[in-house]
Amino acid sequence: MAYWCDCTRDVIDARAAERGGPPGYDGYCRDRALGPGAGRALRFLTPDIGTTMVHDVVRGDPSFENATIEDFVIVRSNGSAMFLLATSSTTAT
């Protein structure tokens, strides 16, 4: 459920400008079968379909369309781990 990506911020921004869509990563490296290497980040592969619901004691049970969640970085290109979200449980449908 993870893959290596060599896209820099400049490449991500340029690809977003070319496609005229929303800013952010577009999954370009998903099927490139890259291995670990210098300057490569490890991304989590988010599902393209369905929704994800997060149980939250403050906000209730918000849900998000998976298609709106970009493949996020879990290990930066410099090898340091990324911390994004902590939750006691999530449910993907």
Image (cartoon, rainbow, N blue to C red):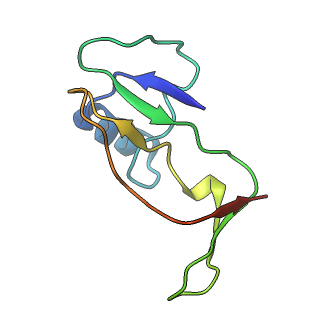
**Residue under the image location 50 percent in, 25 percent down:** 3
**Residue under the image location 37 percent in, 55 percent down:** 84
| Residue 16 or residue 63, whichever sits in front | 63
Left or right of residue 22: residue 9: left
**Residue under the image location 55 percent in, 26 percent down:** 30
| Residue 91 or residue 68, whichever sits in front | 91
Left or right of residue 68: residue 13: left
Left or right of residue 19: residue 89: right
Residue 90 image-quadrant placement: bottom right
Furthest-right residue in view?
Answer: 93
Residue 62 image-quadrant placement: bottom right
Q: Is residue 39 above or below residue 90?
A: above
Furthest-front residue in view?
Answer: 88
Q: Is residue 23 above or below residue 61?
A: above
Quarter of the rendering occupied by the N terminus? top right
Estimate the x, y position of residue 86 in percent, counting from the top left: 45, 61
Estimate the x, y position of residue 40 in percent, counting from the top left: 31, 21
Estimate the x, y position of residue 19 in percent, counting from the top left: 46, 42
**Residue under the image location 47 percent in, 52 percent down:** 21
